[in-house]
Image (cartoon, rainbow, N blue to C red):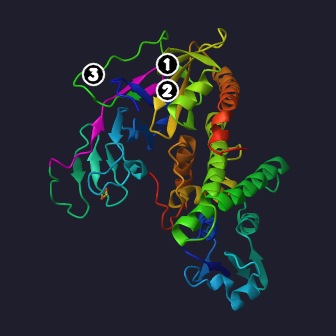
Amino acid sequence: MTTEHRWYPVCRTQELVAGHVAQSQILGHELAVWRDHIGQVHVWENRCPHRGVRLSIGLNLGESLQCRYHGWKFATGTGQCIHIPAHPDQTPAENLQVTRFRGAEKYGLIWTFVPLKDSIPQMPELPLADGITLRSHILQAGLSEVLDALGKIAQPIDAWIWRDHDQHIPIHYLLQPMDQRFVAIHSLWGGYLTHKDWIEISRRENARLTLAFRSIDVRSGITP
Amino acid sequence: MIKLYDYEISGNCYKVRLLMKILGVPFESIPLDFYPGREHKSDWFLAINPLGQLPVLVEDNFCLRDSHAILIYLASKFDESKTWYPTRDPVQMGRVNMWLSFADAITSAAGAARLHDSFFYDMDAEQVRRQAHRLFQILDETLWFSEQENDGWLCPGVLPTIADIACFPYVMLSEEGGISRLPYPAIRRWTDRVKKIPGFMIMPGIFNGPE
Ligand code: FES
């Protein structure tokens, strides 16, 4: 799909509401993304080290994430298993750890990268202090189809960051390559908005993007 | 006492049980052998419901089929606050009815895909999955804006309605029909909210939510 060693957005920060475990994906890696009791964000492989059940159907307990299947608990921060209900008196072995990805919060989005090299990649620089995100779109299509459709409304700054053609629409579109079937597009508004304006613009831009991507839905047979 | 002709792993039966539990309505479940026994197509049951579908509610001499008709009946009769089915508010009631029809469409799409994958029904599974994705796109968009402008229920307002109860089961069971909810983050957050409704209960394949 791509071998670029770089940060990609995985979801909007606002999506990580208390007690929730968001499900996302990056370059074929399924992710469970959650915010703990002190507000720290964790990007974990969406796979319980016990039997591989998705952690995104588990419970966000604040200090730990509990797997749905046999109730193992994994500590915030380390991903270390700290409790096995079937053996409550035993200390779980140290190798019982969730695979973690590095997470970051910037521009109103949660970011991560798949480590293809030893270094930590540079976070993309956008000409924005912070960001106000609009509704993200997750499209059932390959990357080239998505880029074709996106080209109708925006132009690339680099392969993964696009800017609206229209000078009056200060939106950057950030791409998230999920896997062969899905690509997410996150819309980032540059500048301040009141809540009321934000909702209005969210509705307007949501409608515009839906229209721009209708050809993709039609091709994948998902038609109105 | 209310009797419910019932099947444990039917989403349509579950939505009726769920509302009765939330409203604190006692009932007696009469389980049928839907699969593999096809008892819902037996002569004795067809005499009760000629459509051969579950659930059916029986109360004294009153007999009601169709899960959504049953939800409307139960909410109108037992919910004194009149919020679950807002009979005093025509606008809201119109919205609830609109989403009840939408829930039927979800059943015919996501519910059908599950019958294909888990109960080996013969149908064009790809076609119903595509239809389910189209419906889930609409649902996700509605819920996303509802989170921003309201309290995140299908119909505007601070409280859930039977529209949420009606849409919930076959959305939750969609992965048993090969329909991933990965592309629908607002739907995923809404299912967390439904699970926090006081009185919420589970069925096989639908788990408890965060406390
Ligand atoms: S699979 Fe997660 S605890 Fe068993």
Q: Are marks 3 and 2 on the same chain?
A: yes
Q: Are marks 1 and 2 in contact (CB under 8 Å)?
A: yes
Give the labeled residue for mark 2: A175
Q: Is residue A36 in sight in this rendering?
A: yes
The residues colored magenta run A94-110
Q: Callout 3: 10 Å neighbours few (<14), some, many (20+)?
A: some
Judge by depth and name the residue closer to the eye, A43 or B110: B110
Give the labeled residue for mark 3: A120
Q: Amino acid at mark 1?
A: Ile
Judge by depth and name the residue closer to the eye, B46 or A159: A159
Q: Is residue B174 left or right of residue A45?
A: right
Image coordinates of residue A121 in percent, x first then y, are 31, 20
Q: CA distance from mark 3 to mark 2?
A: 20 Å
Q: Vertical placement of B23 versus B136: above or below?
A: below
Ligand 1 is found in which quarter of the picture?
bottom left
Q: Residue at x 32, y 31 (%)?
A: A114
Give the labeled residue for mark 1: A161
Judge by depth and name the residue closer to the eye, A62 or B202: B202
Please, what secondary structure does the residue beneath circle 1 have? strand
Q: Is residue B81 in sight in this rendering?
A: no
Mark sitting earlier along the chain (1/2): 1
